Structures are given as C-alpha cells and as structure tokens.
Amino acid sequence: MFLVWRAFLNDLVSVIVPVYNEAEVLEAFHLRLREALDLIAGIDSEIVYIDDGSTDASRAVLHVIQSKDPCVVIAQLSRNFGKESALSAGFDVATGDVLIVIDADLQDPPELIDNMIQEWRKGSDVVNMRRKSREGESAFKKLTAHLFYRVINRLSDVPILQDVGDFRLLSRRAADALRSMPERCRFMKGLYAWIGFRQITLDYHREARYAGATKWKYWGLWNYALDGITSFSTGPLKVAMYVGLISAATAFFSGIYFLVKAILFGDPVPGFPTLIAAILFLGGLQLVAVGIVGEYVGRLYHEVKARPKYVLDKVSSSGRCRTGA
Ligand code: UDP
Ligand code: MG
C-alpha cells in the first residue's frame, strides 16, 4: 500500500546551502535557485539554508525569503562552526530522497541541478561537479590548489578528485553513509570519495563570486590542507621515520669513517662549523618529526573528546514540501 502511494509522489530534492555572512547575495541566489528548480519536471524541492552563525543581516534576509517561499528550511547554528560542520547539519536536517550541496555565492550555477538529477535518475549515487575554470581566483591560489591535489592523491588511499568542490549531488543512501561517519575533523572532499558507490563527474564553468568576499584566507587553506592530509593518510609519519633512519645511518657511517681516519692517520677531529651544522640540522629534523606526530596527536585529541559537530540554535520549517505528482 505504502509503495503504491509512494509511486505517485514526486522525488523530494533537498538543496543544502551553507550560509556565512552572505546577506548581499542571498536574495539573488534564492531567486535563481528557485527558478532553476521549478523548471525541473517531476520533483518537489526543499531548500535548506544553514546559517553558520552569520554576523551580518543574513538571518533576517533568510526569514524574509522563507516568508515568501514555504519550502525553505532554516537551520540556525549556535555560532560559526565552519562550512564542514554546516554541511553536516544540512545533511542531518534535509529530508529529501536526493541531496544537493551548493554555495550561496552563485559560484555554482543552480541551472546545472537539472543535469545532476538526470544523472541520478540514470543510477548514479554521487554526481561530482568538476570546475573547468576558476574565474576570479589568483594564479597563486590556482597553483597551490593544484599542488595540494597532487600531494593528497599521492598520500591518500582513496582517489580525491581534483577541482571538485562541495557542489555535488548525493543520493539518500550516499548521504546516510556520509552521516554515519563520526569523525570531527571532517575533510569533506575525502569523505565523499571514501563512501564509494557509483559516482560520476560532470564538468562545469565556475563563476566568480556574485558579491561579497571569500571566507578563505591562506592560513585557513593551509590548515585545510593539513587536515586533508592527516585525515586521509599516515604517510607523513612514515616519511618522518624514514628521514630519521636515513640520518641515523648517515651518522653511523660517518662515525666509522672518522674513527678509521683518526686511527690510521691520527687526525684530530676537525671542523667546529661542521659539528654545529650537523647538530642544528638534526635538531631541526627532530622538531619537524615531533611536529608531524603532534599534528596527529592533536587530531586524536579532538576525536576522543567526541564533541558534537555543531550545535543547533533552532530549525524553522513549514513542514514537508512533498506534493502529489
Ligand atoms: N561558509 C560557511 N561557513 C564558513 C565559511 C563559509 O557556511 O565558516 C559558506 C559560505 O557562505 C558559502 C560557502 O560556504 O556559501 C563557500 O564559501 P566561500 O565562497 O567563502 O568559499 P570558496 O567559494 O572561496 O571556496
Ligand atoms: Mg565561493
């Protein structure tokens, strides 16, 4: 009986939008998203805005949007937790059969959701969107991003797609797999790859920000890169060990060399500068190795505390947005 009733229902698409200080773009974004969704046949949609502790007028703007569009859900986090946590909140709150993550700044064109849903209907569980171009981003950012993907793919066990951001579609079961992962250090690009399932990648043209500025500073990106590497690989620990082994072996053999030289030629041990350089070099190596171990220990510390990924202030929704076909 349920199945028969279910067959007459449209698929419910949940669009998850993390929002942090995006007041300037929200209205334009919502209009464009709503227009794009309304053109897709056979779906109902709910738009889940996660207000990640915005300090500008975003919250008020969202409520105005909600007053005009009943299929808007607003989940308010109790403070700024960062995009990863905001997305986790989005996955928990969304009720759809299929979930789509999109940025609020109109860098990801909502019109592509139609193509993504078609791929999902053909049987893909995850539709990744790969940027063919990165407008409005400096050459330095492009270069560092490229290097980052090279490094992480060398180290990680699962392939992490280059130039694929958070803009993607997840089927309900893919989203549930993602939700079942309890880790606090959420390197989403890696988690999306880790869940597996049938994945497909579409290319798209990433636009420049509509308004406002990116929240990413270089320091943030560096920490993000460290998070990615440490959550998906213990490679750096091995590197530290091998570098230690190599320097110990070098020290051992050079020790024998100097000993033999001193016995055969009665050479006084020369070179105060060499000694200082060697001590400093080894001291540096040790600190780097301890630092690498520290990165992992620090993350263990966050994981064992097992704090929730986010705290919800409140969720406002007008109920389910599923209508008949
Ligand atoms: N965002 C968020 N919490 C944060 C930072 C960003 O929810 O702490 C949201 C932001 O509002 C936007 C998306 O994440 O919708 C992407 O942010 P941004 O445009 O700054 O990143 P970029 O596009 O430069 O990667
Ligand atoms: Mg952006």
Image (cartoon, rainbow, N blue to C red):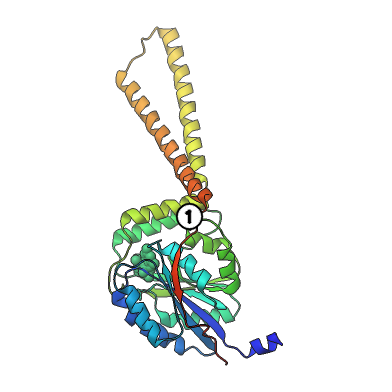
**Residue 268: horizontal and vertical position, in percent?**
36, 10
Let me know if residue 150 appears in the view: yes
| Residue at 59% from the left image edge and 62% from the top image edge | 180
Answer yes or no: disc 1 within 8 Å of ligand 1.
Answer: no
Question: Split into 4 quadrants, where in the image is the N terminus?
Answer: bottom right
Residue 212 placed where, x, y %? 27, 71
Tell me residue 204's x, y (percent).
42, 75
- Residue positioned most to the front: 314
The quadrant the C terminus occupies is: bottom right
- Judged from the image, the quadrant occupied by ligand 2 is bottom left
Closer to us: 12 or 271: 12
On the image, numbered disc 1 is attached to which residue?
Answer: 185
Expressed as whole percent of the image width and height from the top left, the position of residue 213 reads: 28, 67
Q: Nearer the viewer, residue 254 or 111?
A: 111
Q: Quadrant of residue 56?
A: bottom left
- The residue depicted at 49 percent of the width and 83 percent of the height is 45
**Horizontal side, residue 314 vs residue 198: left or right:** left
Q: Tag 1, which secondary structure?
A: loop
User: Within 10 angstroms of label 1, few (less than 14), some, or many (20 or more) residues?
Assistant: some
> In the shown orientation, is residue 88 left or right of residue 273?
right
In the displayed structure, 204 sits above or below 223; it is: below
Amino acid found under the numbered disc labelled 1 = Cys
Quick check: can you spot residue 160? no
Which residue is rendered at x = 61% and y = 77% of the image? 123
Drawn side of residue 99 relative to residue 76, left or right:
right
